[in-house]
Image (spheres, rainbow, N blue to C red):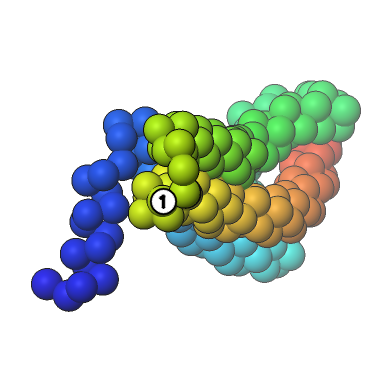
Amino acid sequence: MTVENTLWLAWWHEADLVIQSVFILLISMSLLSWSLMSYKTQQLHRIIKEEHRASEHLDTHAPLATTQEKLIASQPSHALLNEALKQPDHYEREAISSQLSQRLQQEHLQLENGLTLLATIGNAAPFIGLFGTVWGIMHALHALSGSETAIALDAIAGPVSEALAATAAGIFTAVPAVIAYNLLLRRIRFASGIMEGNAIRILNQRCAAGTDNAQ
């Protein structure tokens, strides 16, 4: 075991339960945010790719039922097609459009799942780190209170280190979460734009098919 590892272990064992809890909480929040970032990035990449493919199928103007068979059941455009196809032929365009809008809103909300957690981590982590900082400073002041003469640096080095490390841990946890939140929100808006375009294509073809069936 190296000297650095020995120092880190000694520092951890000297920290009290509050500081240890702060670091465990921040590490857990960081792992959770990175896992969520990875999942949402892969999810949005897959959905955008699938929705582009759905746009290509819809542009061929094939029957909607045929197009639906070519799509993956879990993708948003498949749900939009399912919603459009179950509407009666005598429904007016406004009625079908309303149903598609509601379904589109549901799909958009599903894309936003997890963003609230990222925002919470990004906003809360600095304050949790700040709490650890305040607690470490309190320990340093408490160590000084027993010294009537010269200040013993070794008495306050540990608490001050705890305070600085807590601040760094809070920032390290918060910054990636905030950056990921903004980037993922932009990708969600991009995906929603493709979905809205597909919804318009589906609406136009569904209304055209309903008119042909009525004739």
Query: Is 115 above or below relative to 87?
Result: below
Q: Is residue 87 left or right of residue 133?
A: right
Number of labels in the image equals: 1
Residue 91 x, y percent position in the rendering: 79, 24
The residue singled out by tag 1 in the image is 152
Viewport quadrant of the C terminus = top right
Residue 101 x, y percent position in the rendering: 77, 33
Viewport quadrant of the N terminus = bottom left
50 and 99: which one is in front?
A: 50
Q: Residue at x 41, y 51 (%)?
A: 152
Query: Is 143 above or below relative to 166?
Result: above
Q: Is residue 88 left or right of residue 140?
A: right
Q: Residue at x 61, y 55 (%)?
A: 175
Residue 172 in view: yes
145 and 43: which one is in front?
A: 145
Residue 57 in view: no
Disc 1 element: loop
Query: Is 31 above or below relative to 20?
Result: below
Q: Residue at x 22, y 54 (%)?
A: 10
Residue 52 x, y percent position in the rendering: 65, 65
- Classify mark 1: residues with Cα within 10 Å, few (<14), some (14-19) or many (20+): few
Residue type for callout 1 = Ala
Q: Is residue 176 left or right of residue 104?
A: left
